[in-house]
Image: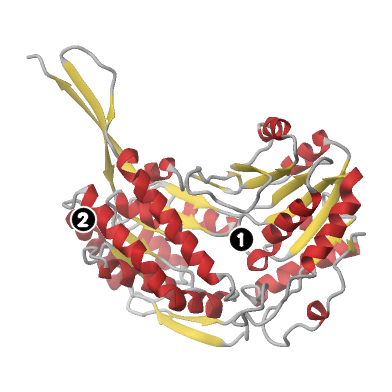
Amino acid sequence: MGLPTDEREVLTTISPTTNQPIVTRHGLNSAELNALGHRAREAQARLRKLSLSQRQGIVAKALASLPDSRDVLGQDLTKQMGRPTAYTPGEIDTAVKRGEYCLRISSDAMSDTPGDEQRGFRRYIRKEPYPYLILMNSLIPALLAGNAVVLKPSPQTPTVAEHIQRIFVAAGLPEDVIQYFHCGSSEQLEGFIRSGNVDMVSFTGSVAGGRAIEKMASGVLIPVCLELGGKDPAYVRADADIPKAAEAIVDGAIYNSGQSCCSVERVYVHDSVHDDLVAAMKDVLRGHRVGDPSDKDTTLGPVISKKAFESIHQHLTDALSRGAADATPKHPNFEQLPSEGNFIAPRLLINVKQDMEVMQEETFGPIIPVMRVSDDAQAIRLMNDCKYGLTASIWTKEIARAEEMADEIVAGTVFINRCDYPSPDLAWSGRKLSGKGVTLSRFGFEQFLKFKSVHIKESL
């Protein structure tokens, strides 16, 4: 049931480390949200009066100042998400690098595209912006393209949007070009999407959330870009460098406690090197530590919520009850977890079967299921036997063979001897239930632009 139009929603963030309330924010009532949308329209008109070089200057200044806020941004990620402080500085630095890449390519990406030459005529395609509801992944290209942006942050991380708005306004961005609102009501969110003040929606989250967003926008005839879940496979061939593959795959599987859309969630390995890989992965796991994310020695913090904690354990229970074996190395830290919070030790599973939940459903936790295969053909078949298709990785010394295999794998990105790394110069997209649309690369600009063709007859 929706909120009365004159009431403001109260949203409380629960710490994943203690399961206690840590942040409270208030939403907007219907009139305030409608006014926010109108301000976005007006702000975009002001933004369009700035040249691309002026917008580039503002974005460059904001990116240059982001490292100055590294501590406060990192502290909020640790408190609200459980991200270990050992990793938060790197996350801020990576965000800056991606933004800088967008800056470098923005002039070329948004330049006019000429039509075919014809005597007496001149034709070209011009690219124009429009306003939309967007999440952080696409903020920089959206602003460079000349769009006003409305952020709807997750209730789990409400302060991120507040910090970003502050930083960009300080860099000279016109008032109301970036706005945000806090919301947990699907009815209110749908009302905003259908208000006529939104021309595009970009959503990053679960498949269920993406389906809900697409339903909210149905019939409005606006683009919807969805970056959704994954069940990303890795395949270790017989000729792979086993120690290097083990180190990278474990990191790709348990970084941020496995809470990444492109984390490695299932591992296929050629039967001849199965035992070697498992032994090497055990060695890597022994170097990890679960605990308080504010402790600089912690490498795995808690998972985001009790609901996530329960879902991960359900996948474990299903696998173990159906014949999977727990191959996790003995480690005192893994067996003596903090009594409060949503802490889960990494788990290495062997003897798994393809139809187990842990091999089919997105786990979003620090679980590494490993399955034997007899050859490349079986590996490709099993990698594709899933309703998701975000990324996949192949580990081998035969690069040419891996490139051939990449053509057969149904995924938006195929890594070879690497994983869990969205490169800003490559298109980021999903197949099947992993989403639709493109972010990153020069193609990522296109979803924030409308194309206008101009056809001129010069000889009268």
Q: Three-letter amino acid code at disc 2?
A: Leu
In the rendered image, which quarter is residue 446 located in?
top left
Query: Which residue is pictured at 22% across the width and 23% down the height?
Result: 123
Secondary structure type for disc 2: helix
Q: Position of residue 46 (x, y in %)?
A: 17, 57
Residue of label 1: 260
Q: Nearer the viewer, residue 43 or 222?
A: 43
Q: Three-letter amino acid code at disc 1?
A: Ser
Instruction: Answer few, some or many: residues within 10 Å of disc 2's Cα (few below 14, many 20 plus, some between 14 and 19).
Output: many
Q: Position of residue 105 (x, y in %)?
A: 36, 44
Q: Nearer the viewer, residue 218 or 252?
A: 252
Query: Which residue is pictured at 16% across the width and 52% down the height?
Result: 49
Residue 43 in view: yes
Is 175 drawn above or below residue 237 in the view shown?
below
Looking at the image, residue 338 sits to the left or right of residue 259; the answer is right
Looking at the image, residue 394 sits to the left or right of residue 425; the answer is right
Asked whether the residues under the numbered discs 2 and 1 touch, taking CB atoms below 8 Å apart as contact, a structural biologist would say no
Give the CA separation, mark 2 to mark 1.
Answer: 34 Å
